[in-house]
Amino acid sequence: MIKIFINPGKFINFANFVIKPLIFISIISFIIGLIFALYVSPDDYQQGSTVRIMYIHVPSAWLAMLTFLIMTIYSIIALAFKTPFGFIVNSAVAPIGATFTFICLFTGSLWGKPMWGTWWVWDARLTSVALLFVMYLIIIFLKKTTNNINLGEKITSIFIIICSINLPIIKFSVDWWNTLHQPASISKISSPSIDPSMMKPLFIMTIFFISIGLLIAIIRIKAEILERKKII
Amino acid sequence: MSIKYQRLIIIIFSLILIASAIFLILFNSKKNFVFFLTPTELINSDKILKEQIRIGGYIKTKSLIKQKNNNYYEFIVTDKENEIKVKYSGILPDLFREGQGVVIEGKIMGKNEFLASRIFTKHDENYMPASIKKQLKQKNYWNKEY
Amino acid sequence: MQIINSITALFYKEYKIAYKNLYDILTIILFFLLGIFIFVFSIGPNEEIFQQIGIGIIWTLLLLSNNLSIKRFYQNDFKDGNLHLLHMSGMSYELIVLVKLITNWFFLQIPFFIFIPIACLMLNIQNDNIYLILLTFLIGSPILTSIASISGSLNLLNNRNIEIASIIVMLLSIPVIIFSFGIIKAPPELIKPQLSFLIGILLLFVSITPWICAACIKIAIRNS
Amino acid sequence: MLLANNLSFRRENQTIFNSLDLSLSPKKIIHLYGNNGVGKTTLIKILADVLNSDSGEIYWNGKNIKKNTYEYFSNLTYIMDSNTSNNQMSVIENINYWTKLFSSNIKSTELESVLKMLFLNTKKDIKAENLSRGEIKKLELIRLVIEKKKFWLLDEPYSGLDNDSIVLINETFRNHLNSNGMIIFASHYCPEIPNIETIDLAKYANN
């Protein structure tokens, strides 16, 4: 079972098996999610209708961080056990993570203007997410700086491991420091401070983001594997 | 001395350094990187801050004085212990209302007075449908304190 | 002890090269001073403004001049095979990196201690702040050296897009800038915790740099 | 005693050499021979633990060199294809640096005579960047004498040298072999040394 995530051949079998259901799930969850987010869910007591930006902003922020976490884990695995599959995943997934980070920053900015009264402010959470975006870009560029693709990937993995220190900073910046950005609503396990009627669309949109991200990632990884096989 | 011994020594050296680094960082992280000061922190600090600073707190209920014709506002920012009077002229964000959390950028004018140049409203991590809030208020379950 | 001989030999060589390339080091300092001129001319000689932003200008230029020294770390030694020769003499790569860090800090950052006060005088910064700048630079400069070393080793075989090395330096220097600038602006009772926070960052960087750089050098040598 | 079995190396989907076996005992010399691009330098780099081979292992005195790198390196002098002498430092400074780096116990009189033999004694204070190509190579070869190791691994030791120096180097090789030394070198030139074993790398390339 675990070999699916390490062995390229098994991954391709898994990918072929899983692509169609993923397309189905993402379309369904997108439609239902949009209906819930735009019509069914109620207005917030403080923010009114603007709260609906949350249904895109929060899942994309989660996925931006999750993608980086996956890249970090694969970097460590690839460097420690010398499995090139990790490098393939990293190069396939980095642009997706960058896109999610960009969506997060963009929607956050749109949300900030009406709510906080500013497009952008230099507080710890916003700055660290902006740095995450820059890191994604550097990761994408760094791979292509050397003639030897193998070397570029290893170097990039080391860089990813260095940059992973940003993840806890993003996560805990709102708790450690006084920030304009509000603390997390969902991570409180006991009772999330989001009303169930707003939790539902958030949950469905998260499923949509995860499935679309996985779908693109799997297609990209598969393409990358096939391209490398052609070379060898 | 073989390469293995060298690396062992450097590993021990690094681990000690990392441990002390983590200790120093975690121990001091709270006092750092201030996006805003609370009124209490501002009143207690001795240094006269000439530069632009930010203060954060809640707007005291029934303290907002509006002069709508020229967009001039006066209100009191509190953190339940100390209060600071803020003067501001300009456009307020949508979320600005009494009891709301705000971050205010500006300069200190005198004893407990503050001239704001920009106002950011801070919303909390609670998300709740507006209808439920009404119901709660009717039944007097709404006891969120500011 | 053979290893001590090897270390002194490396120090000797680094000293010789630094001494013979004194003009290169002076160029970096000249860059720093000229940068301050450029700021003065582009903003206009307004004392009040410089008292406010002078510290930021100095730190920015220190960071940018740090960018110029990225290639001095491993590039030449890597190209002519000296890194492997040092390894064959019985030094592990981590040790080589440590020695390189010390020498590069000594030859490239120490001269700035003379020129920072001069720059401060040019920008009319108050005396109290000059001490604080020097103190933060004492703690911050080894971090800058480590960052340049990390970036240099990440880009050992990069002969296409060396600009990305500078970008990495700037990205990793952001915490240093934030906290060293924060110390100078902080109220007096917050200076001590912030300084120890900066020391924490320094220890972190010093402890991880040899491992990161050694890993990069090994990868580069294996793929040369 | 050096033993390498089943070495192979591929670069960019191209097999450079395949299933190459090599063994070297004291008093033996191996000459790696072949046209350009046949993998001489690559093999030397693999033997010096610079590159990793795609398959096969190398043993020094019965121990894998990957696991006993330090012991192997303390017996190995490796003359690279690039010049390790520093351009900015003078001849004598380079030599001093190497003596200190390898904790050599070479006597100054011995060093002096070597320098004299190589006609470098008049150029001691000249920067390495001002030397001619052959002189830089000679300076590089002085490391053989300084390091005093058992196993010499040389990449193109003859390139750019004049006839006198070539004779001198062959002489040094013979002396080294007589004192239980081991040599592997790669070159296009075939020197006259008794008991020389020549390996044509073209045989191991199977495309």
Image: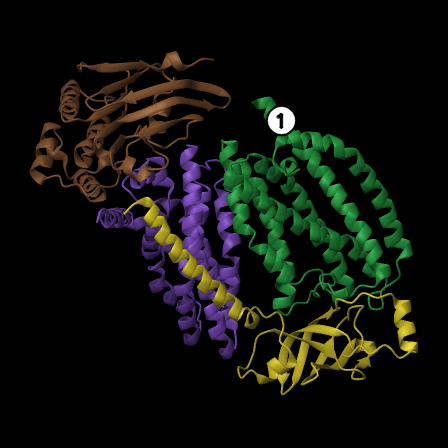
Chain colours: A green, B yellow, C purple, D brown
Is residue C65 at all visible to an observer of this figure?
A: no
Residue C92 percent across, percent down from the top left: 34, 45
Q: In the rendered image, which quarter contains the C terminus of chain A?
A: top right
Of D49 and A157, the residue lying toward us: D49
Question: Residue at image x 82%, y 60%?
Answer: A50
Q: Is residue A81 left or right of residue A96?
A: left
Looking at this view, name the residue that lies furthest to the front. Answer: D62
Of C54 and D124, the residue lying toward us: D124
Determine which quarter of the picture holds residue A127.
Answer: bottom right
Is residue B85 at all visible to an observer of this figure?
A: yes
Q: Is residue A25 left or right of residue C26?
A: right
Residue A108 percent across, percent down from the top left: 73, 57
Per the image, the residue denoted by label 1 is A227
Of D27 and A63, the residue lying toward us: D27
Task: Count the numbered circles shown.
Answer: 1
- Residue D59 position (above or below residue A58): above
Residue C33 percent across, percent down from the top left: 40, 58
Q: In the rendered image, which quarter contains the N terminus of chain A?
A: top right
The residue tagged with tag 1: helix, strand or loop? helix
Residue D18 percent across, percent down from the top left: 42, 18
- Residue A136 position (above or below residue C176): above
Question: Residue at image x 77%, y 52%?
Answer: A56
Question: Residue at image x 37%, y 53%?
Answer: B10
- The subunit letter for the residue under badge 1 reads A
Few, some or many residues within 10 Å of mark 1 (<14, 14–19, 20+): few
The three-letter amino acid code for the residue at tag 1 is Glu
